[in-house]
Image (cartoon, grey):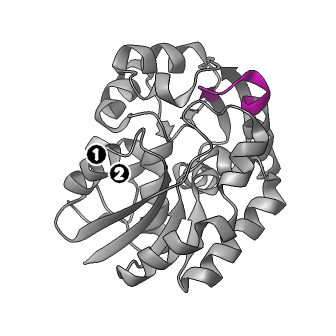
Amino acid sequence: MTALGILYPGHSGEDDYPRIEQLLGSNVRVDLVNTETAGDDALGADPLRAMGTPAGLEADVAELRLAGADALVWASTSGGFLHGRDGARVQIRTLARMAGMPASSTSFAFVHAAREMGVRRLAVGATYPDDMAALFAEFLRSAGAEVVSVTGAGAGAAETAAWGEGELLSLARGADPPDAEAVLVPDNALLTVAHLPALEKHLGKPVLTANQVTVWEALRLADRRLNAPELGALFTREPIVQV
């Protein structure tokens, strides 16, 4: 049994995680702890940065450690990249020391997932305001990616948590120029897992979403690679262990 520890802020898109657990099979457990948030519709950078301070997550980290997690991921894209690349590195190193296990964040999960897929020219379809979407793109560029398109919808978590396939497809299509090799949708409040096959079919390219890459990153830290095509092209990479 591999136990994946997820620190998830609030109560918006966390229903993706039991769905992912079900699709991965009986030998993977997703342990999710809900952390305090900056508010359902907090779009400003300062409250979102404060939300992910290691000191504020200490009790939640301890809960995952006691639950027997093998790896830990901070499941807030904005709560990572808003610290900048260096600050986000310090954040996850501190969480790893506190937890006594490998740790990462959704922001770095996007970087590592794009590398795993062998895609460099990326399109960003974000629910964030334009300025925050631009900061996420800058984070990706600092890791060596070429961001060819950035779209920000300026929607809050309370709104996006109710989005379905139509809204997701509209966001992804609006952000997707022909030369993009993959589309990234960086908001953990979005429920995307049930729609990944349809999104990739419509766009004809890989789609990486926040909760999807968060679990993939936890598996990577735990040294697991699983083949689960219903979770998108990211989960069909070698080496394959069939689910």
Q: Determine if residue 156 is in view.
A: yes
Q: Is residue 205 left or right of residue 232?
A: right
Residue 104, compared with residue 66, is above or below; it is above
Q: Which residues are magenta?
A: 124-133
Pointer 1 with pointer 2, Cβ within 8 A = yes
Residue 73, compared with residue 38, is above or below; it is below
Residue 132 on the magenta span: yes
Residue located at (20% from left, 54% from top): 22
Quarter placement of the N terminus: bottom left
Q: Give the spatial CA distance, label 1 vs label 2.
A: 6 Å
**Res 177 → quadrant:** top right
Disc 2 residue type?
A: Thr
Residue located at (64% from left, 29% from top): 124
Bin the neighbour count of mark 1 within 10 Å (Cα to Cα): few under 14, some 14-19, many 20 and up. Answer: some
Disc 1 residue type?
A: Pro
Question: Which residue position holds label 1?
Answer: 229
Please identify the residue farthest to the bottom as the structure is shown. 100
Element type at mark 2: helix
Pick the residue in front: 10 or 24. Answer: 10
Residue 185 on the magenta span: no
**Res 66 → quadrant:** bottom left
Pick the residue in front: 114 or 110. Answer: 110
Pick the residue in front: 2 or 47. Answer: 47
Residue 152 is labelled as none
Q: Position of residue 174 (x, y in %)?
A: 58, 13
Going from N to C along the chain, the mark reached first, 1 or 2, is 1
Residue located at (81% from left, 52% from top): 84
Question: Which residue position holds label 2?
Answer: 236
